[in-house]
Image: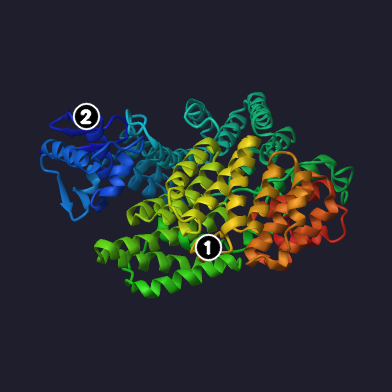
């Protein structure tokens, strides 16, 4: 009897056209844990933590053995093997609906990125029936919620693919209807909200589109005390009759955003041309539209190479060539070198070396077993963490894939510090998509396990402090001031007392007093109290920061702080310092956005237009 493992909805074993009962909740949870990692050896301690994450009972190993024994009697041809201190479910990955779903989404993404839209839609249609409802329905606890968040993120990729294709093909009514139906599933997802607005505008529902934008802006101001340059730009574009085709997101990269303000270069006649035409062009450029609207100009940012392109090619158009497995000691050196590229802000070089590093690490892992395999899992996870950091800096949607793979490999390694690193990059991606509270929950759940380590100078406690900083900044984005400052204060206290004595770690971010001060600049800017960030900025000596990437981060945070305080000259000085210390940082989308925002309000600053053209914030 062929059995199917169904996790996308109620947890079921399906055979002979009917569900097979799984029994008690713990057995269903053990089944889900093993099925999501089918074919992998899952350590007993990991299973116990995931199954009883709401408080393990006494004699937990005995309870696990009983649950597995009962489960085996229900699995028929599927086998659960006990090997050493691990369990493994032996089954075809295609027998698990979650793995089928992820594989189909990856295939649809690959086809979409190649430009084969018809096949991408065909594959997406095959994925939809697998999604029967809330994943892992009926299971409570931290681990099921983490997996639900991950699977919702995978599903979101299909929604984005279909929406983008529909928008490009002019199916505005259908896209608007579908995204309206899904609003309750993704209430805070600004990217999906943007696509819905564009679909409404394209469908001729201009008033509804404008009201939707205004509602989003009101919600952002009320909940997070912030605005959105992107939605402000869309409102300006709609009111200036920019064609909807010119507002669609560019395939493969997000559009830059800018705050539209009164610009003396956009009033009256410019080169004999009508003011409204000039404003329409500026609005179009600010939203990253096609060159035809810019009347023959070329967007500098579009011409520069995307650092993530080689990694995206590896993820979505895998080569038939089999990677050579690299010895573990050599992988350590290659990982260290790749981390060095990140810290030196050499993002194009990092993007170039990552595909081979990931492929060779995965090839080595697949040849190993036991502890050596766990070590290789950790290296794979750290390589995907680096890819996620790169994706975050360049606003590449590949961060959903890389962060998810990082966490999967980290959990397989069983190493708390690696799990913490992977959880951090996944939480950052969740935060960027609007899932702030879920991101904080993920960070705090992983931090709790790291905090249990007795030695406060241990790498585990350092990783704990790093998660606290990320959670603090995320809380600031929700305007939870007390929580943000409490979390940052906890990390700062650890750094003040123990950072100098802690061993050098392998994380991409080291927690030091200066690093905590850096975060506090961003936290206060997000909380709407940038003046409180000034003392933290003054206590940092940029030259003493450990890397070019950290120095660029300091100047970026200062630029945002001065921007919120309307100190435009200091803002521009900070932007120029980014370019001086790390030129590739100055070309990042977020820094280009700051430059464009400054252009909109102070276009007359000496040297600003030349700086903007050089860094890709405006046509050269």
244 and 419: which is toward the camera: 419
Whether residue 347 is visible: no
382 to 98, vertically: above or below: below
Position of 39 compared to 591: left or right? left
User: Which residue is under mark 1?
Assistant: 502
What residue is at 19 percent from the left and 31 percent from the top? 22
296 and 586: which is toward the camera: 586
Name the element at disc 1.
Answer: loop
Q: Quadrant of the N terminus?
A: top left
Could you tell me how far apart the alpha carbons at marks 1 and 2 are, in whole angstroms? 45 Å
Position in image of residue 189 (x %, y %): 54, 36
91 to 209, vertically: above or below: below
Mark 1, Cα crowd under 10 Å, few <14 / some 14-19 / many 20+, is some
Q: Which of marks 1 and 2 is in front?
A: 1
What residue is at 67 percent from the left and 54 percent from the top? 518
Q: How many labels does the image show?
A: 2
User: Which residue is under mark 2?
Assistant: 24
Q: Earlier in the sequence, mark 1 or mark 2?
A: 2
């Amino acid at each position: 009897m062929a059995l199917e493992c169904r996790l996308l909805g109620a947890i079921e074993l399906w055979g002979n056209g009917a569900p097979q009962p799984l029994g008690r909740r713990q057995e269903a949870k053990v089944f889900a844990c093993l099925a999501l990692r089918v074919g992998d050896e899952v350590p007993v301690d990991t299973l116990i933590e995931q199954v009883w994450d709401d408080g393990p009972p006494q004699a937990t190993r005995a309870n696990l053995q009983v649950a597995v024994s009962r489960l085996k009697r229900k699995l028929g041809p599927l086998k659960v093997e006990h090997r050493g201190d691990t369990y493994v479910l032996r089954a075809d990955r295609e027998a698990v609906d979650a793995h089928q779903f992820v594989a189909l989404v990856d295939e649809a993404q690959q086809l979409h990125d190649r430009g084969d839209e018809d096949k991408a839609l065909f594959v997406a249609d095959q994925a939809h029936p697998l999604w029967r409802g809330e994943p892992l329905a009926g299971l409570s606890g931290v681990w099921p919620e983490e997996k639900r968040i991950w699977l919702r993120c995978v599903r979101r990729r299909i929604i984005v693919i279909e929406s983008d294709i529909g928008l490009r093909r002019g199916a505005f009514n259908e896209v608007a209807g579908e995204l309206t139906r899904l609003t309750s599933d993704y209430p805070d997802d600004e990217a999906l909200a943007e696509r819905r607005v564009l679909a409404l505008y394209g469908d001729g529902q201009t008033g509804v589109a404008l009201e939707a934008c205004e509602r989003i802006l009101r919600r952002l101001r009320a909940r997070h005390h912030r605005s959105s340059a992107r939605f402000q730009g869309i409102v300006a574009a709609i009111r200036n009759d920019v064609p909807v085709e010119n507002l669609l997101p560019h395939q493969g990269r997000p559009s830059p955003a800018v705050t539209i303000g009164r610009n003396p270069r956009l009033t009256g006649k410019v080169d004999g041309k009508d003011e409204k035409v000039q404003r329409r062009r500026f609005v179009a450029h600010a939203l990253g539209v096609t060159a035809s609207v810019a009347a023959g100009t070329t967007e500098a940012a579009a011409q520069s190479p995307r650092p993530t392109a080689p990694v995206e090619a590896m993820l979505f158009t895998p080569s038939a060539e089999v990677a050579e497995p690299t010895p573990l000691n050599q992988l350590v050196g290659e990982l260290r070198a790749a981390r060095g590229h990140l810290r030196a802000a050499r993002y194009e070089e990092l993007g170039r070396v990552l595909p081979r590093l990931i492929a060779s690490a995965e090839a080595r892992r697949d040849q190993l077993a036991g502890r050596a395999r766990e070590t290789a899992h950790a290296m794979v996870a750290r390589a995907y963490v680096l890819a996620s950091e790169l994706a975050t800096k360049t606003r590449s949607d590949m961060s959903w894939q890389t962060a998810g793979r990082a966490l999967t490999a980290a959990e397989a390694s069983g190493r708390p510090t690696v799990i913490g690193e992977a959880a951090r990059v996944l939480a950052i991606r969740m935060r960027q998509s609007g899932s702030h509270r879920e991101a904080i929950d993920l960070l705090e759940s992983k931090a709790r396990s790291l905090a249990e380590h007795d030695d406060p100078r241990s790498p585990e406690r350092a990783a704990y402090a790093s998660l606290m900083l990320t959670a603090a900044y995320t809380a600031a984005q929700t305007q939870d001031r007390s929580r943000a400052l409490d979390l940052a204060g906890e990390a700062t206290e650890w750094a003040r007392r123990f950072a100098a004595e802690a061993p050098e770690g392998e994380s991409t971010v080291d927690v030091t007093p200066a690093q905590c001060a850096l975060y506090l600049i961003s936290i206060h800017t997000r909380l709407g109290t940038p003046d409180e960030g000034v003392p933290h900025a003054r206590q940092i000596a940029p030259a003493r920061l450990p890397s070019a990437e950290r120095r660029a981060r300091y100047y970026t945070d200062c630029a945002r702080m001065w921007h919120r305080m309307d100190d435009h000259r200091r803002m521009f000085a900070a932007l120029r310092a980014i370019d001086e210390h790390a030129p590739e940082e100055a070309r990042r989308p977020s820094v280009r956005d700051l430059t464009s925002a400054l252009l909109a309000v102070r276009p007359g600053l000496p040297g600003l237009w030349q700086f903007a053209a050089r860094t890709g914030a405006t046509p050269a």
